Structures are given as structure tokens and as C-alpha cells.
Amino acid sequence: MGKYVNDHLIKDESVAFETKYHWVIFLTLKSLLTLTIAPMIQRALSEFVITNRRIIIKTGFIARSTFEMNLSKIETVNVDQTVMGRIFNYGSITIIGTGGTKETFHNISRPLEFRKAFQELC
């Protein structure tokens, strides 16, 4: 589990599922131009976690972006996968909260397991 999630767990909260960016992020122009350093940093420093109380997603290092939402405030978690995504087990997840909040994260490893873990906790 990543440092951000460890530092921000609340009392009686535990991690139920964790994933990260898929290795497919190494097959981009950005990866080629930075000699794979940028995707290595992106993958190492990003956290996609479901706890028994909320979803926590942290991306970025210097320009950090975090998304935290209580499980009770989430209406659904949608998964989009291409044919290659189905073969190699990666895709996009879209978290839709009450009140119309909508956040999409691309190239996530094991997106169907992410959704299943969310559904099991609700």
C-alpha cells in the first residue's frame, strides 16, 4: 500500500483492494520521449485504493491530484475496456457520485476487480 493512503487512513479503516496503472502506459510516445522515466514515476507514485469506507485515488508527484469519496456517496463505478484492454486486463474506470460528480481514470490495471471490490463493500 502506498504512503499517501497509509498516512490518510482514519480510525477503523482498512484497505480492501488496491491497484495501479497498467504496464501499457510504457507503450506511449511520452514513454519513448522520456526513456520510460515518466511512466515509471507515474506508476510508482499513483495509488488506486478501496477501503471499507471510501475510495481513495492519488495521482501525480509534484502536481498531486487526489480523489476521495465515501462509499455511501457513490452511485456506480463504470468500466470501459477495449479489445486489447480485455486481453491484457486494463481499462478505464468512471466513478459517478451522488449529485453528478463524475471522475474517470484511464489505463487502470484490473478494472473489473476494482468494480467488484466496490460492489462487495456496498
Image: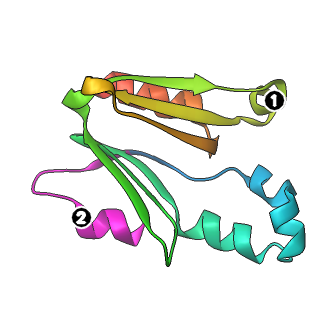
Coloring scheme used: rainbow
Q: Residue 122's spot in the image, x, y percent? A: 26, 23
Q: Compare marks 2 and 1 and give the one earlier in the sequence.
A: 2
Residue 71 visible in the shown view: yes
Q: Residue 22's spot in the image, x, y percent? A: 69, 50
Mark 2 vs mark 1: in front: 2
Would residue 97 appear left or right of 29 to someone viewing this image? left
Q: How many other residues sit within 10 Å of disc 1, few (<14), some (14-19) or many (≥20)?
A: few
Asked whether 1 or 94 is in front, the reply is 94
Quickly name the residue at label 1.
87
Question: Which portion, as a residue range, is magenta?
Answer: 1-16
Residue 101's quadrant in the figure? top left
As displayed, is residue 121 above or below residue 24? above
Q: Residue 88's spot in the image, x, y percent? A: 78, 36
Residue 1 visible in the shown view: no
Q: Residue 24's spot in the image, x, y percent? A: 78, 50
Residue 35 painted magenta: no
As displayed, is residue 5 above or below residue 110? below
Would residue 29 appear left or right of 50 to someone viewing this image? right
As displayed, is residue 96 above or below residue 30? above
Q: Amino acid at mark 1?
A: Ile
Residue positioned most to the front: 100
Quickly name the residue at label 2.
8
Quarter of the image for the N terminus: give it: bottom left
Residue positioned most to the left: 11
Secondary structure at numbered mark 1 = helix
